[in-house]
Amino acid sequence: MPTTSRSQIPSAPSARETDGRTPTPIARLITMSELLEIVPFSRQHILRLEKRGRFPRRIRLGENRVAWLRSEVEQWIEARVEERDER
């Protein structure tokens, strides 16, 4: 039986690469505990900001699980920095 090294076996293209376009990054979700490490607010303050439309909205993943898109949180932080720099 002939042996084949791993380098000779072609890898299957991912679903994001099969159409010839550059693969897009996969969205990264962060939990409340991860969010609290990034943003120095309490859980209650984050909820208040969300309700006022002043913070990225959470994504419900299940009955008892929520997360935020890390990219949206990072954009929110960048907007705060831009506001500061404009003053």
Image: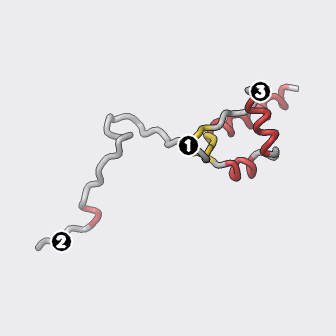
The amino acid at mark 3 is Arg
**As drawn, which residue projects farthest toward the right?**
87
The residue beneath circle 1 is 61
- Label 1, secondary structure: give it: strand
- Residue 41 spot, x, y in % from top left: 81, 44
The amino acid at mark 1 is Leu
Q: Residue at x 59, y 39 (%)?
A: 60
**As drawn, which residue projects farthest toward the front?**
63
- Residue 47 spot, x, y in % from top left: 76, 37
Give the mark toward the camera: 3 or 2. Answer: 3
**As drawn, which residue projects farthest toward the left?**
1
Establish if 21 lies above or below 65.
Answer: above
Q: Are marks 2 and 1 in contact (CB under 8 Å)?
A: no
Residue 80 shown left or right of residue 15 in the figure: right
Observer-nearest of 59 and 7: 59
The amino acid at mark 2 is Thr
Label of residue 16 in the image: none
Q: Residue at x 58, y 44 (%)?
A: 63
- In terms of image quadrants, where is residue 53? top right
Quadrant (top left, top right, bottom left, bottom right) of the C terminus = top right
Q: Residue at x 55, y 44 (%)?
A: 62
- Label 2, secondary structure: give it: loop
- Pointer 3: residues within 10 angstroms few (<14), some, or many (20+)? few
Observer-nearest of 50 and 78: 50
- Nearer-N-terminus badge (2/1): 2
- Pointer 1: residues within 10 angstroms few (<14), some, or many (20+)? few
* Distance Cα–Cα, label 2 vs label 1: 45 Å
- Nearer-N-terminus badge (3/2): 2
The residue beneath circle 3 is 52
* Distance Cα–Cα, label 3 vs label 1: 22 Å
Residue 67 shown left or right of residue 86 in the figure: left
The residue beneath circle 2 is 3
